[in-house]
Structure formats: C-alpha cells, structure tokens
Amino acid sequence: MKILVTGSAGFIGFHLSIALLKKGHEVVGLDNLNNYYDVDLKYARLIETGIDPTEIAWNKEVRSIKYNLYKFIKLNLEDKRELMAFCKKNNFDVVINLAAQAGVRYSILNPDAYIQSNLVGFLNLLEVCRHNKVKHLIYASSSSVYGLNEQIPFSVEHSTNHPVSLYAATKKANELMAHSYSYLYKLPTTGLRFFTVYGPWGRPDMAYFLFADSIMAEKPIQVFNYGKMKRDFTYIDDIIEGIINVLEKPATSCKKWNGKQPHASSSIAPYCVYNIGNNKPVELMIFIKELEKNIGKKARIEMKGMQPGDVIATWADVDDLIKKFNYKPNTTIQSGLKKFTDWYKGYYSIKELSQLRVETV
C-alpha cells in the first residue's frame, strides 16, 4: 500500500515509518518540524530514515537514501490548499495521522496551538481522505480523553465527556469529527487511544525522559501528587505492532449496533475506537526506581501536589484489540526501560562528542 504518515519526525511516527517500510509498503512522511521540543532530535530521526536535512524545504518531497520506498515532506496540516494538492498527486491508500500539538500541561499555556493543529489540521485531513477516496484513516487519540472518569481499567465504553485539559478535548473532538465523516462519506476511520508510550527516540517532554535528564545531570526531579500516581506505560514496539495490525483491517459497520443502546466504540458507520496500552499500570515510584537502576544514579526527588489537567491513574482495557487483532503487548517495564536508557546514553554521548568537535573547529 501507499501510506501517508503524518508526524513522521515524531516519536511514534518515526518508528512506524520504519516498520511499514520493512513490510514493503511505500511510505511518505509528513511533518512541520515545529520547535515544541528539541528539533535536533527530530532531524536525527529523519537522518536515521535516510533523509538529508540539507534537502528539506517547505512543500518539497525529499527521497530517502536508505529506503527506496520512503519520501519526506515538510508541510503544515493547517495549509489546506498545499495539503490537498500534495495528497491528490500521491493518491494514498491509507492515511495514519500522528501529527498533533502534544502535551497536557502545554495546552494550558498555549491553547491556540491545539485548535490550529489538532482541530483545523485534522479537519483538513478528513477532507483529503473524503475527496481522494482513501481506504482507511487511522488517527491518534489519547488516554487523556477519559478525564474525570474514575472507573478502571478504562474501557472504550466508558464516558469521555468530562476532559480536564484542552488537549484531551481536542482528541475527543477528533473522534467525533471522524465519526461524522465515517457516517456521511463511508470513510473507514479507526481511532487509537494511546497510553503513555515510551522507548528509544522518545519525546523529551514526557515525564520518563525528563526524569532521565535530571537524574543524569544530578538535578532534582518533580514528582506530582506526592508520587501517588499510576500509569499504563506502553513500550513503543507494542504500540507499533498494534497500529500495523489495525492497518490491515479497516473499520466496518457494526451490524449489531443499536441506536437505542449505542456502543460508544463502534457504529453503523465504518468507525471504531480502541485503547492501545500495556494493560498493566505501574506505580510511578516503582518506575523511577527502575530508571535509577538502569542509569546507575539515585534521583533527587521533590514531591509536589497534583498538577492542573493531570489524572491520578491510567489503565487500558485492551480486550477489543486482543480479540479483533490478536494484540499482545509483552514488553516489561524492566526490559523497556533498559532499552530506553541504553539508547539515551548512546544518543547523548554521540551528540556531546559532535558538539565538542564543532566547538574545537
């Protein structure tokens, strides 16, 4: 298939693009390379996929020197005219939308960025899929949509009507927008609610990455709600396996769906929503101890109260994904964090050496 992966210079998009290429798919990656976090890391991911950073320019397709079925384009989803022209020319079979303005806490400070990227950008993608008869749209939702819901594990049949951050609200809006297009235009859409994804090449704004930075630098780490938090940490390889399994089976109409007793995760339209997580929540303090062990240093911990927009626990009920797609998340925290810290030490030692060479010259 010919597949568009948006957010391809991001953490999940980078890993997914490589996995799809190894399966023989033709992939075009799209990213605007914004500076929400370290742009050098985004460029480093692109270099890993064979994209020459010196060739990158707005609305220019750059072919990989490593994968002959991979191209990259720097583009904003908000630029509807350019996006429509680009997608019409490429005639994609599948679109996987991982591009978004991420971050719960950042949404409190910069709400406008979330409206433009997560709502306007997503609408433009829906229009692209509608007008180009895309066979399947897969898009990233988030565990954040569960908001004030306290029933655990989180089920796709639980209420998601009480978000506690604008980020979460935009992800819930994406699900509603997708359903309307599935119903009106018979566009198969699949939403995936990601649960705290971690691993090599991860996002520097995520807690586990910030913890690693501070522990390595022997600086204090801030632990919110006095450490009484649980997260369904999910290793990147398990996430990628789930996405690829879903890719091969587009959403279909649920024949048993009943408007008088409607299921929230399916529809008479070709629409589905799934949780994608590890289904094994871990206490935050246990996670930190494992990180300390792998880094080889003790954390200096500053206990803090609850942060606005945060939730105490996440736990994914992934039964639907297991039944329909044989999803098997099997990476333990011990194994996953070792892989992350091994990468982390290697990446930053190489980066420091390269910076030292530049300063010396």
Image (cartoon, grey):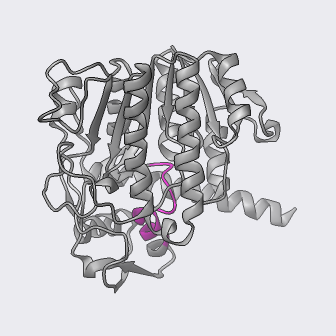
Placement of 120 over or under 306, stated as above or below: above
Q: Position of residue 39 (x, y in %)?
A: 66, 55
Q: Residue at x 51, y 76 (%)?
A: 217
Q: Residue furthest front?
A: 260
Magenta stretch?
A: 200-213
Image side of residue 309 versus residue 19, left or right:
left
Asked if residue 178 lies in the magenta stretch, the reply is no
Residue sitting nearer the eye, 206 or 352: 206
Rendered image quadrant of residue 176 = top left
Quadrant, the C terminus: bottom right
Q: Position of residue 253 (x, y in %)?
A: 27, 19
| Number of marks present in the image shown | 0
Q: Looking at the image, can residue 184 be seen?
A: yes
Q: Residue at x 65, y 23 (%)?
A: 87
Q: Residue at x 52, y 48 (%)?
A: 118
Q: Residue at x 53, y 22 (%)?
A: 130
